[in-house]
Amino acid sequence: MGTQLVWFKRDLRVHDNAALAHAAALGPVMCVYILEPSYWRSPDVSQRQFDFLRECLRDLFVQLKACGVRLQVITGEVTEVFERLHQAHAFSHLHAHEETGNGLTYERDKAVARWCAAHGVQWQEHAQTGVVRRLPSRNQWSARWTERMQAPQLNTPTLTPAPWPWPAERWSDWPAWGLAPDAAPARQTGGRQEALQTLQSFLNTRSGQYRGGISSPLSATSACSRLSPYLSWGCLSMREVVQAT
């Protein structure tokens, strides 16, 4: 098989990552995260989200390095980045997870599908949450969710790196995006290690306060799971949280 490109979106982990596992089984792998100007200049985002993402990516860089490959973080619109990369080093497959995002990211995914079809690239898009796109009714949803959550978790793969065709971007050169200052000194820290610690502290200790503490503004910050950002950015898979619970 040819070169496999893994496009990380909201799946910033190597454990139980279907896109990464399938790519590893097919051939040499390139791994990329794309910082999209159109997204980071949209009204949906904030500086604290970007700071959280930066921490997640640094953690993912370490995870992938242990698997044998480098995470490349590229600034640009997605199809333009793919076009440039395909011209420099043609890849046969694109692997990614379905993203549960907003209208902008959904339209971008449809543009990527058109680009892949035009360039003969096979795009394998994997489900990872409870969202099922294009489901005609709710009748089949519960059974699909249960099957997905009960399936075995995918192990962390060993990867064969494909050569990256141009010098890596320096992370210090990432754009500021013009986001307004958004100081949140008590915000959660991004990354898988922080996510695992938060999950275990909830299941082993803090969940005992949940029923009585979740309704109070004073206690809800510790009584709730605090897993939302880690699930949103895929530092944990939904399946591993369900099975751990």
Image: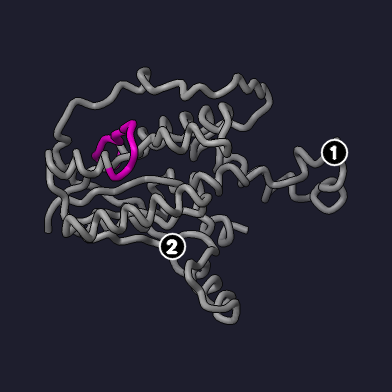
Mark 1: few, some, or many residues within 10 Å (few <14, many ≥20)?
few
Mark 2: few, some, or many residues within 10 Å (few <14, many ≥20)?
some
The residue that mark 1 highlights is 217
Q: Residue at x 58, y 28 (%)?
A: 48
Query: Where, by quadrant of the figure, is residue 98 drawn?
Result: bottom left
Which corner quadrant holds the C terminus? bottom right
Asked if residue 191 lies in the magenta stretch, the reply is no
Query: Where, by quadrant of the figure, is residue 141 drawn?
Result: bottom right
Residue 6's mark? none
CB atoms of marks 1 and 2 within 8 Å: no
Q: Position of residue 154 (x, y in %)?
A: 39, 59
Q: Position of residue 131 (x, y in %)?
A: 53, 63
Q: Residue at x 14, y 38 (%)?
A: 163
Q: Amino acid at mark 2?
A: Ala
Relative to 30, 200 lies left or right:
right
Q: Amino acid at mark 1?
A: Pro
Give the secondary structure at mark 2.
loop
Magenta span: 65-79
Q: Nearer the viewer, residue 214 or 52?
A: 52
Asked if residue 69 lies in the magenta stretch, the reply is yes
Relative to 161, 53 lies left or right:
right
> Mark 1 or 2 closer to N-term?
2
Q: Position of residue 177 (x, y in %)?
A: 47, 24
Relative to 139, 154 lies left or right:
left
Residue 127's mark? 2
Q: Is residue 217 above or below residue 11?
A: above
Which corner quadrant holds the N terminus? bottom left
Q: Residue at x 32, y 42 (%)?
A: 78
